[in-house]
Amino acid sequence: MDEGIRQDLTAPTSTADGSTPLVSVIMPLYNAEAYVEAAIHSVLASSFRSLEVVVVDDGSTDGSAKVVEALAETDRRIRLLRQANAGPCRARNVAVAASRGRYILPVDADDLLAPSFIADAVAVLDQQPEVKVVRPTIDFIGRRSGRWHLPDFSLRLLARRNHIAACALYRREDFDRVGGYCEELKAREDWDFWISMLKHGGKVVRLPEVGYYYRVVAQSKRFRDRKLAAHVIRTLNIRHAAFFEQQLGGPLRRMRSWSRWINALTRPLRYRKTVTTEVAPPVKQFVEELPWRFAAEGREIFKNRNAIRRFEVGEDTLVVKEFCLPHAFNRFVYRWFRSSKAQRSFEYA
């Protein structure tokens, strides 16, 4: 975080009556001078009053920041932060770090929010702790009109495509738990965020009333993102390999809808054997996911030709040793004439 942002964080935002806001609306801003005033006014027109609006100007080159500055002078619930251009992920993370609300709602600077959505969504999260995300029904505005027909939530579908729009209410504690938005991604960062938040459980509720208006312009991010498909799929496979293995039987493929079929056909080429003792069934899933989790998670204890890492799995602490893949001749020997070193270590243990 640059020095200018750090200095601005010392001035907390309060609601119109001076209390701490319950909801923080975070708004990345980049060259949206024509739309940002209407976007902020739509948030402030909400029937839910305990809110703040934290806008992060992501290096705009037009007059967007000046529009927000003028609005902030008239309403203490609005706050403007600035950063050099770093993308919407960084802007959202900075906005959440500066915010104070228990609930977080991302709103894009060229979209509009319906007056009742925040109040209705807060009521769901307050009353249903098993719900992690409340999303609105969405209509298009701008160069396209009509309903944005998104399917009901399922993990299986989330593994193939993102069907939760960026504008959805969630708890700050869940944001902190997953580490915020992944700044490695140049597109579809909300897809990665929802996978991180929901892959281990949690319900998603969609409100029936139209709560959000998504603006389609000539260069809408939704269409620019399609050009970065290979980068997105590669990054998601690195970050969520175990999730895709569980839901798709292998990695997410470029032809996303065909991922399960392709993985089923190629599974015989990906020989993998898992052996666990009958006295330790709770760790079975962890062991099955180790090929993807070992390098990305855990704390390294020892590293030489082989590596030893420590993992916290529920209430258990597991120490795992990695064995390098033997050369081709030994692999043949281990399969037919002798147990592998890993197998023998397991048996001796």
Image: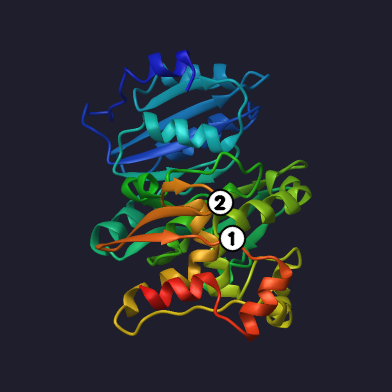
Quarter holding residue 270: bottom right
| Mark closest to the chain's N terminus, 1 or 2 | 2
- Residue 165 makes an appearance in the image: no
Q: State the separation of the CA atoms marked 1 and 2.
A: 7 Å
Decide if residue 116 is on the left or right side of residue 342: left
Which amino acid type is shown beneath numbered disc 1? Cys
The residue located at (43%, 56%) in the rendering is: 197
Horizontal and vertical percent position of residue 203: 39, 67
Which quarter of the figure has residue 236? bottom right
- The residue that label 1 is drawn on is 324
| Residue 13 vertical placement versus 260 (above, below) | above
Vertical position of residue 327 compared to residue 64: above or below: below
Q: Secondary structure at mark 2?
A: loop
Residue 115 shows in the view: yes
Residue 23 or residue 263, whichever sits in front = 263
Q: Quadrant of the C terminus?
A: bottom left
Relative horizontal placement of residue 202, taking residue 161 as reference (left or right): left
Left or right relative to 262: residue 318: left
Above or below, comparing residue 24 to residue 2 in the picture? below
* Place of residue 85 in the rendered image (x, y in percent of width and height, measured from the top left): 62, 25
Q: Secondary structure at mark 1?
A: loop
Asked if disc 1 and disc 2 are in contact, CB closer than 8 Å, the reply is yes
Residue type of the residue flagged with mark 2: Arg
Q: Position of residue 196 (x, y in %)?
A: 47, 56
Numbered circle sitting on residue 305: 2
Q: Residue at x 61, y 78 (%)?
A: 334
Viewer-side residue, 325 vs 103: 325
